[in-house]
Image (tube, grey):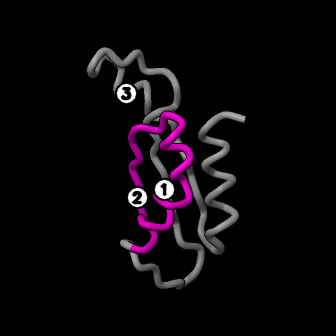
Amino acid sequence: MNRTKRIKNILEKHFNDISIEVTDNSSLHKGHNNFDGTGQSHIFIQLTKNTSLKLNRLEVHRKINFLLSKEFEKGLHSLEIKIM
């Protein structure tokens, strides 16, 4: 299973009533510090609330970083999180 699918599976297990999109943006960073644009190391996550659920953005960011700590150990370099 590739990294984007693993990340989506992890987040879907822990966030209810939220639509989750996970995109690999690694190719956008090709050439930066000799990076070749492969490896799914730059990930964009967009969370969209499906209900009137109140979210504490800081807590959501902390939870995502905690849940993905093993992905960071395995080469995840950059994570962009957008909450709608």
Residue 66 forms part of the magenta stretch: yes
The numbered disc on residue 2 is: none
> How would you rate the neighbour count of disc 1 (Cα within 10 Å): few for under 14, some for 14-19, many for 20 or more?
some
The numbered disc on residue 28 is: 3
Q: CA distance from mark 3 to mark 2?
A: 17 Å
Mark nearer the N terminus (3 vs 2) = 3
Extreme residue toward the right, this view? 1
Which of the pair 1/70 is nearer the observer? 70
Q: Is residue 44 above or below residue 32?
A: below
Which of the pair 61/47 is nearer the observer? 61
The numbered disc on residue 46 is: 1
Quarter-of-image position of residue 16: bottom right
Extreme residue toward the left, this view? 33
Q: Tell me which amino acid carries mark 1.
A: Gln
Residue 77 forms part of the magenta stretch: yes
On the image, the x and y values in percent for residue 21 come to: 56, 52
Q: Tell me which amino acid carries mark 3.
A: Leu
Mark nearer the N terminus (1 vs 2) = 1
Q: Are marks 1 and 2 in contact (CB under 8 Å)?
A: yes
Q: Which residue is mark 2?
A: 82
Q: CA distance from mark 3 to mark 1?
A: 17 Å
Q: Is residue 59 above or below residue 82?
A: below
Q: Secondary structure at mark 1?
A: strand
Query: Residue at left 59%, top 69%?
Result: 18
Q: Tell me which amino acid carries mark 2.
A: Lys
**The C terminus appears in which quarter of the rendering?**
bottom left
> How would you rate the neighbour count of disc 2 (Cα within 10 Å): few for under 14, some for 14-19, many for 20 or more?
few
Query: Residue at left 59%, top 74%?
Result: 50
On the image, the x and y values in percent for residue 15 come to: 62, 69
On the image, the x and y values in percent for residue 66 come to: 50, 61
- Range drawn in magenta: 59-84
Q: Secondary structure at mark 3?
A: helix
